[in-house]
């Protein structure tokens, strides 16, 4: 009986995470597919579908924002009436496109990534969608740009929403700066805060090297956010985990 159960578990595990960009923490691939096919794909804008399918052909496609998270971000930005946003970590721009489509015609997005080549893969789709004019892309590390922005007080409290999906070992450093740039009542979203579920894995658990390397940084961030009196937080099991931080002072 135990052998049968183990075989079934192995089959279940083998059947998980087949969707490109799939970072869902749901126990069943079938349940995740149900969400995608029932409420995500039927409502996914054609431009986002095109960019998702283009990104699926890229060798680093695991880096993309999942379709359900893209839908969540798009609705969230509409709910808070965001007009000025920032994105740290762009890749091919799926979450960036979700943001740009949600913002008003005069909306503004400062987008930063160390790799312009990946961004330019998705740029033709973004241009075709008619929202490229909302985006200012800066190539290179974000921290020097943030330091420059923080040094100028006119930037303080000027952002409605900031989305971070970049180098996990710098999330704490980003937070120290972003808290000054987001407005009181505005949101910062940190992606991957459940990090493949590894945040609850035992120390000797078999993990991929990159998952193990960044896990401690994610754990450090989660602890720091929970203790930060300047924000209210909500950690959601969407995608690979996203923590929303609402600045309260």
Image (cartoon, rainbow, N blue to C red):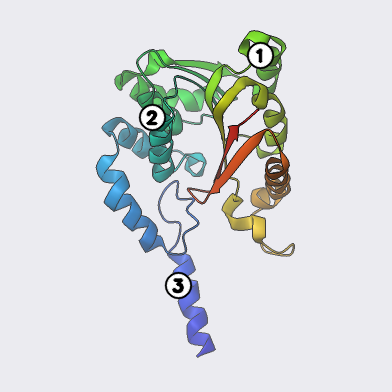
Which residue is farthest front? 249
Residue named by callout 1: 149
Can the viewer see residue 163?
A: no
Q: Which label's residue is closer to the chain start, 3 or 2?
A: 3
Nearer to us in this view, 34 or 82 = 82
Q: Residue at x 49, y 67 (%)?
A: 13
Give residue 175's position: percent from left, percent from top.
68, 31
Give residue 245's position: percent from left, percent from top.
59, 36
Q: Which mark is residue 11?
A: 3
Q: Residue at x 35, y 15 (%)?
A: 105
Q: Which label's residue is closer to the chain start, 1 or 2?
A: 2
Q: Residue at x 66, y 39 (%)?
A: 168
Q: Which label's residue is closer to the chain start, 1 or 3?
A: 3
Q: Residue at x 45, y 46 (%)?
A: 21
Real-space CA distance between mark 1 and mark 2, rounded to the nearest whole angstrom = 26 Å
Residue named by callout 2: 78
Q: Secondary structure at mark 3?
A: helix
Q: Secondary structure at mark 2?
A: helix
Can the viewer see residue 112?
A: yes
Real-space CA distance between mark 3 and mark 2, rounded to the nearest whole angstrom = 40 Å
Dot 1, crowdedness within 10 Å: few (<14), some or many (≥20)? some
Q: In the rendered view, would you say 174 is above or below 221?
A: above
Tell me the quarter of the picture where residue 152 sits. top right
Tell me the quarter of the picture where residue 104 sits. top left
Nearer to us in this view, 223 or 165 = 223
Contact? badges 1 and 3 (CB < 8 Å): no
Of circles 3 and 2, the one toward us is: 2
């Amino acid at each position: 009986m135990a052998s049968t159960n183990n075989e079934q578990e192995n089959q279940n595990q083998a059947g998980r995470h087949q969707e490109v960009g799939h970072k869902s923490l749901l126990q069943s691939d079938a349940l995740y597919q149900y969400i995608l096919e029932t409420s995500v794909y039927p409502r996914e804008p054609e431009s986002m579908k095109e960019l998702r399918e283009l990104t699926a052909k890229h060798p680093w496609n695991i880096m993309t924002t999942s379709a359900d998270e893209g839908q969540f971000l798009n609705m969230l930005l509409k709910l808070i009436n965001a007009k000025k946003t920032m994105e740290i970590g762009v890749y091919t721009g799926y979450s960036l496109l979700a943001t740009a489509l949600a913002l008003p015609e005069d909306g503004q997005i400062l987008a930063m990534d160390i790799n312009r080549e990946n961004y330019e893969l998705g740029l033709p789709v973004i241009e075709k969608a008619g929202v490229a004019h909302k985006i200012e892309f800066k190539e290179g590390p974000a921290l020097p740009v943030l330091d420059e922005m923080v040094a100028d007080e006119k930037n303080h409290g000027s952002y409605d929403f900031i989305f971070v999906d970049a180098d996990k070992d710098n999330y704490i450093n980003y937070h120290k700066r972003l808290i000054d740039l987001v407005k009181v009542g505005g949101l910062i979203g940190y992606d991957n805060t459940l990090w493949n579920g590894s945040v609850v894995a035992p120390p000797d658990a078999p993990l991929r090297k990159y998952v193990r390397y960044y896990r401690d940084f994610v754990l450090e961030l989660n602890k720091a956010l929970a203790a930060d009196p300047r924000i209210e937080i909500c950690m959601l099991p969407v995608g690979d985990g996203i923590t929303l931080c609402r600045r309260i002072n």
